[in-house]
Amino acid sequence: MKKLIVTMMTVLLTLTGASAQKPQVLGKSHAMQRVEVKGKYLLLPIQEREENANISIIAAGKQLQALNAKLAVDKVDYYVPVDIARFGTKDLLLDINFQGDRRFTGAMKDFICWKEMKQSDTFDTANREKFRPSYHHTPAYGWMNDPNGMFYKDGVYHLYYQWNPYGSQWENMTWGHSTSKDLIHWKSQATAIEPDALGAIFSGSCVVDGDNVVAFYTSAGKSQIQSMAISKDNGMTFEKYAGNPVLVSTEEDFRDPKAFWNPDIQKWNLVLAVGQEMRIYSSPNLKDWTYESSFGRTIEALSGNIDEYGCHDGVWECPDLMKLPVRGTDKQKWMLICNINPGGPFGGSATQYFIGNFDGHKFTCEHRDTRWMDYGKDHYATVTFDNAPEDRKIALAWMSNWQYANQVPTKQFRSANSVPRDLDLFEHNGQTYCGVTPSKELDALRGKVVTKLPKTCEIVVDVKGSTEIVLSNSQGEQVVMKYDAAQQTFSMDRTRSYASFSEAFPCETVAPTYGDIKQLRIFIDNCSIEAFDAEGKMAMTNLVFPNEPYNNIKVKGGKATIYEIKN
């Protein structure tokens, strides 16, 4: 898809009807609509409460594109664009199969989508959502979940992401693309990788291989298989490998390839999530992969007992594997990231990790307990940038939870990424844990110090023993954060934040602090609160949707400094 015109100013659209003809109703669930191409985009009217309609775009008897969209029946929530100019034809046929019960939705000929389907040379992506973050990455429009294929090259960070271009709920998985020079300000780019005959484009990774960038992703069709694409223009466009797929399996859940160069063995490694384990492969050339080992659960041949590491309450997804320094020592250890859904410590999805050794063939874990990278409820699909400068391991997460991600109170877009975080390791009571520190690029966002709580800010709290921080507004909504010095825990209670969209949303999340906290860093955006121990021993990410921004703060047991966000 060619690059959409993205502007933060309202554009007055010149709209024309999609067609002068009425739809051809062919049955109780089947209709066709002819379209005379008059503009760049066909704007589809969407109504989120409806079922997906299956839309095939046809010219001269050939299918040009297939997609699913919740076409409006009696109310338009928003529009999504389909680039029809790229097909190079003046006449198109939409072959549409509706889902749902006609007893409730009425006759197809009366659906409002026929009247409201329009064409335009532009598509307005001006932000009209009060909950859209101001300094977190979001898609220009549509649904977003897992971050994919992140890499750094020639001064630019590239972020791809699971994207639905045709609605603000999960569907039509495609790789969207954004770029940044500072990890804070992101520019929307052209669609990177679109679905094809092998299936939708699920999660994966990118590696920098000399002048080229190589993407690995899961093609999700009748089965989940692994595919590859190559970019020769720094990740702006990709050409799919003619030999796809490069890896196949009989397993139902076989996805999310994470590739990286391993200098210890002078080969490439790749980690795949397969059911409730991670499988490790090696390759000399990125094309031919050899299975090395599996990690997560084993069955003892004689007794039949299952030996498990970590949490297995859901499917394992989105792996990452990296070598990290241990603070204050000359040691290095390996960390395997394993995202899981469901099974998180407070319900739904979350990110667990394992510390140990990796010799290029087998990962050996040194602990048995389950360890969470972030103890909030809205931190998932965490992965790191390939080729990051200074050998940093910079992570981004999807800032939501599968329990309610499709229902959060936004429509133009859904979901954001977390603030960037640098990962390392630290020791506590003889054990090694993952350190999570807000990336140094966030320091540039600090504006002037203020006394009144703005709707976007960073709060730095100097802690003096047990501390309580209460954010509130005039409607009685509040978030309560507590540091318990005796128990060495930090908690965040959002049960009095707006939550009528989901019974799973109200919760209190609690994290171990692995020692005393001296300072807290709390990042507040329009729909999120991310709290960190300034030394990187605790992280907690939670969404909030107050009816009005929190504008009051009370702190007991500490001193707060509030910084405005400077964009």
Image: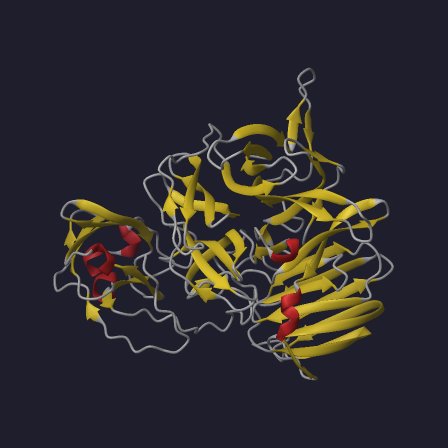
Residue 194 position within the rendered picture, expressed as x and y whole percent measured from the top left: 36, 49
Question: Could you say which is closer to the camera, residue 41 or residue 35?
Answer: 41
Residue 466 position within the rendered picture, expressed as x and y whole percent measured from the top left: 84, 66
Please say if 402 is above or below 472. above
Residue 342 seen by the camera: no
Residue 468 position within the rendered picture, expressed as x and y whole percent measured from the top left: 78, 69
Tag count: 0
Please say if 284 is above or below 121. above
Please say if 45 is above or below 210. below
Q: Quadrant of the C terminus?
A: bottom right
Please say if 34 is above or below 304. below
Q: Residue at x 86, y 47 (%)?
A: 429
Residue 41 seen by the camera: yes
Q: Residue at x 69, y 39 (%)?
A: 310
Q: Residue at x 49, y 73 (%)?
A: 130
Q: Give the residue furthest to the front.
A: 210
Would you say 430 lies left or right of 137 here? right
Would you say 143 lies left or right of 437 here? left
Q: Quadrant of residue 91?
A: bottom left
Q: Quadrant of the N terminus?
A: bottom left
Q: Residue at x 54, y 43 (%)?
A: 258
Question: Could you say which is closer to the camera, residue 282 or residue 479?
Answer: 282
Would you say 456 lies left or right of 212 here? right
Residue 263 position within the rendered picture, expressed as x and y whole percent measured from the top left: 63, 40
Would you say 531 lies left or right of 59 here? right
